[in-house]
Amino acid sequence: MESIFHEKQEGSLCAQHCLNNLLQGEYFIPVELSSIAHQLHEEERMRMAEGGVTSEDYRTFLQQPSGNMDDSGFFSIQVTSNALKVWGLELILFNSPEYQRLRINPINERSFICNYKEHWFTVRKLGKQKVTLYLLLRVICQIAKLTNFYR
């Protein structure tokens, strides 16, 4: 790898920057992620409608904003996961039964998508090093303290 791609954070589009930093290029733009979010919301709406369009649950669902994105540009884990499927990549949640069943050793993994206080960032192996492709040093230090990085 000749150079490291790092997309600078703009607004609250951390999921976009996280994905692009993971993939090492400008592959996703907000419009694409928004489209995925709208598609997921429509699928959820259709599933809710199966319980009856006059049901209280359905009416409540229609009145709530989408959980897949918000006006600030924040995208959900479901949007991130679906975006990765385009590349044939699968997002496996660290605390999921599937992760435990597969007996994945985190040390051997090439990359991680992390969320800390509703901010997405990438930890990725580049060469032989794992690099946090994220600029907010204060949060990195907080994460490092939480994981006993400093001893």
Image (cartoon, grey):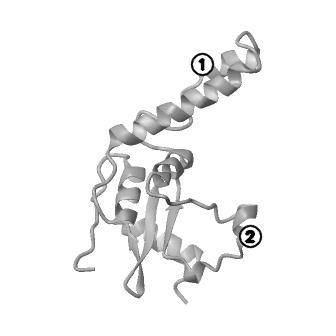
Please state the horizontal and vertical placement of residue 39, each as a whole percent of the image: 50, 32
What is the distance, in whole Å, between disc 2 and disc 1 at their CAs? Answer: 37 Å
**Precedes in sequence: disc 2 or disc 1:** 1
Q: Residue at x 59, y 24 (%)?
A: 64
Which amino acid type corresponds to the residue marked 2 in the rendered image?
Gln
Classify 10 Å Cα crowding around label 1: few (below 14), some (14-19), many (20 and above).
few
Q: Is 150 in front, or is 11?
A: 11
Res. 63 mark: 1
**Does 33 sit left or right of 3 as displayed?**
right
Please identify the quarter of the rendering in which residue 90 is found: bottom right
Instruction: Check the image and report above or below for 29 versus 143.
Output: above
Q: Quarter of the image for the N terminus: give it.
A: bottom left
Residue that sits furthest to the left in the current view: 2
- The quadrant in which the C terminus is found is bottom right
| Visible residue check, residue 20 | yes
Q: Relative to the observer, which residue lies in front, 116 or 55?
A: 55
Q: Which residue, given by chain and number where applicable, does mark 2 sit on?
A: 100
Amino acid type of the residue tagged 1 in the rendering = Gln
Is residue 41 rendered to the left or right of residue 20? right
Q: Is residue 148 visible?
A: no
* Secondary structure at numbered mark 1: helix
Percent x, y for residue 60?
A: 67, 19
In the image, which is nearer the foreground, mark 2 or mark 1?
Answer: 2
Name which residue lies at 46% across and 38% down: 36
Q: Position of residue 72 (x, y in %)?
A: 40, 38
Vertical relation: 72 (above or below) 149: above
Residue at point 42%, 35% (across, down):
35
Q: Nearer the viewer, residue 5 or 135?
A: 5
Residue 10, position as x, y percentages in the image: 29, 50
SS state under label 2: helix
* Residue 42, above or below 136: above
